[in-house]
Image (cartoon, grey):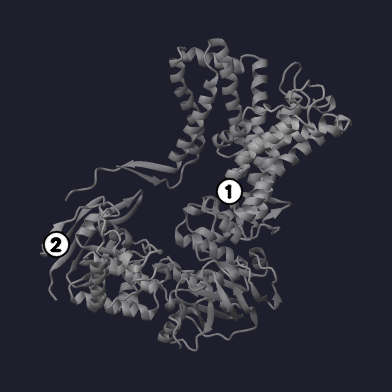
Amino acid sequence: MIRIEPRENPSRAFALGIPVLSALIALALAAIPLLAAGANPIAAYGQMLKGVFGSVFAISEMLTRATPLIFTGLAAALAFRAKLWNIGAEGQLYLGAMAAVAVGSGLLDISGVLLVPLVIVMGAAAGAAGMVAPTYLKVRFGADEVVTTLLLNFIILIFLQMMLEGPLQDPMSLGWPQSAPILDQGVLPPLMDRMRVHSGLIIGLVLAAAAQFMLVRSVWGFKLRAVGENAPAARHAGINVNRSLFGVAAISGALAGLAGVSEVAGLKGYLTTDLSPGFGYTGIVVAMLAGLSPAGVVIAALFIASVFVGADSMSRAMGVSSFLADLVVSMSLLCVLIGGFLAKFRIERTGRRGAKA
Amino acid sequence: MTDTKVLKLNGLSKRFGPVVANDDVSLSLNRGEVLALLGENGAGKTTLMNMLFGHYLPDAGSVEVADTQGSLQALQLGHPQAALAAGVGMVHQHFALAENINALDNITLGSEPMLSLRRNRQAARAKVEELMARSGLTAPLDVPVGRLSVGERQRVEILKALYRDARILVLDEPTAVLTPQEADTLFASIKAMTKDGLSVIFISHKLREVLAFSDRIAVLRHGKKVGEMPTSDADENMIATLMVGAETPKVTRQAATPGTPLFSLKNVSVSGRSKRDTLNDVSVTVHANEILGIAGVSGNGQTGFANLVSGLAVPSNGTLHVHGEQIAHPTPAAMIEAGIGRIPEDRHHEGIVGAMSVAENMVIERLHDPEVQSRGLMRREAIQANAERLARSYDVRGPGTDAPARLLSGGNIQKLILARVFERSPRVILANQPTRGLDMGAAAEVGRRLLEARNRGAGVILISEDLDEVLGLADRIMVIRDGALIEAPNRNRTQVGLMMAGEPA
């Protein structure tokens, strides 16, 4: 028989080591399908490393891929800290992107000093609205935000299609469902010549640092942690729980909205329905890998982006399917969840049902 | 009464991780005997009984139970079914009854084959009625259990055990939810049943009832049996010393003259979700230099009253005044602001945020105090210094002020809450079940702090289900019953008990 008992006090080294170990185990497990596909795993992983760190271009691609994941990872991490389960970052991302193209693609022809901040603020506000609304339903009517935010993703995606075939459609697109491009002065400037990595990354890093600082040091972060860890006690101690929830909902939604802004104004230039290959959902994985720590989100986003970009390059070079990247990402999430469980509980083998006396 | 053994526990031990819950405990029970199992919270009483009943598997030791012929047979451990079949019945502190079906079905539930097509209800009813007549434990059989009183539910639980032909009955804190009179009736029934050969173990920490109703006493401390004696040889002091391991300081109350009114409710009602948190037209005034004790059977509106004073409940009508000023929109923050210190009933659930540090929990009620934060940022050094000072003066022991508060023991969590509440010198203090689950030393400390606060001029509201605690600490006693507060005319134990049961004093 196996008995599961809580650990008295999981050590800090344990807590930090587990995500790293989980990631390594996930990579090791991924060798099995690689072998099945007939590839040499060592060569494949070598190819993967080269694809991520082999050239300035590779690194730029990896950072470009990590940028939206930093935003959506932060969105999930902060909300989850307050036990507000925002599964709607994907939808909020598109709301942010729609707001960005709505104001940035010709509505206002103003200078970049004004237009860039305006695009950012509008995108963040749209994303925030996309999370505050389900939070209101939760607080007022007890509607489970897991369900409402998840389903809103699909509603928003269909709304996006409607907009791209209607008011937001580029008249020059020859009927394609895509928006007009962001004006040149509204674009987030690239960080390097002829590379795709753009200043959205800087915004993401600054916000991650700010979130980390606020969570640990500020009264706001204190309240957020108290509400997440024990809402009844927080309420009893005089903390306005609903206000905290609305605050973190707005920030979480805004961060997800910024992921959309960053993709559309920093990378693609115009909006289509395939702007995000699931960045919102992957952000949840990033946040979990990071142990819901904003600083950890940056590291986890870089790791996941490396896996995706590396697997792309590996599949081109070795002819194995790039779905392997999804496999590694899902397996590292599973490993982290199992590892997190092992960090909190010890599993003991107990002998067969006692002495028969 | 014969001296034949019906139950023997031989050297039972049980560890939970690093905690030794029971260490080599041996115990025996004679036919027709009432054995009281005493010990403080965490002494291992319930663990021991759970091993007997098969809920836990002991790490070492064995159990022998007499069969119907009276010879001792080894009991298969770790199987509640085996214990039931051997004639061991257990009534837990928290009842295991299905509220939506009637008492008769609750009693027979599980004792008949699940797939049998016909049920012999007549025979079952006859057997239960016969049991009720014999034991004197009566309960309405045809009413859904959800509508029965706590005392009736407990009788249903006992009948359920007797229906399964229990010859050994284990009662875990049977009187915790009863009025003194109900408790007396229960013990009278138990006495009557032991004449028929039933043997009873009852777990308790109320010395008074143990001395009055048991034949023999066994005391556990830190998982070990530290004493065993016939009740006739025992006295209160001696058992208390055995339980605690040292003399406990007695808290004594000197009379005081109440001062100005500090806190008052006028015709306040609170509409709650259940009887627990509903108040009907309550008027009460708490004065300076006064401890107001609120006695009552659990679930009669104590939660509603505490929620109101804590700011968690909003009155549906009536007015609430603190220091003569009306609080129109009570919130926890407004109540803290008004100088009300609150010691919540459930310290783990409402008192602390377990995952946050001891130091953080010590300042959680004053996050806007400039001593704790400046311009929205927590002042870490000040918070740390505050925590160290409070831990010293309130003797909060544990792995340190940086450690998560959940690592503290129950008594130390309560000290943390006391420190947080008392260091702000509140004018009004609400203490809701402040000593529940605490060992005697920690409970005495809580009583001492409450008296100290009252002596320096605070008004204290003490809500407790332990009538002895209320009688010991309160200057004035009110009884809460069905959401209404009634002033007790005197401090007579019997009379207050009758009021708790809803009979005219």
Q: Is residue B278 visible?
A: yes
Residue at image location 34% in from the left, 64% down from the top: B92
Q: Position of residue B74 (x, y in %)?
A: 16, 55
As shown in the figure, which amino acid type bears the numbered disc 2?
Asp
* Residue marked by disc 2: B67
Q: For label 2, count other residues whose C-alpha is less than 10 Å away and answer few (under 14), some (14-19) or many (20+).
A: some
Q: Nearer the viewer, residue B502 or B58?
A: B502
Q: Secondary structure at mark 1?
A: loop
Residue to which mark 1 is pinned = A144
Q: Quadrant of residue A290?
A: top right
Q: Based on the displayed image, in which of its 4 quarters is residue A139 positioned?
A: bottom right
Q: Point out the residue furthest to the right here.
A: A110
Residue B247 seen from this side = no
The x, y position of residue B89, in whole percent, is 26, 64
B409 relative to B256 in the view: left or right? left
Q: Chain of mark 2?
A: B
Q: Chain of mark 1?
A: A
In depth, the one of A338 and A222 nearer the eye is A338
Mark 1 residue crowding within 10 angstroms, few (<14) / some (14–19) / many (20+)? some
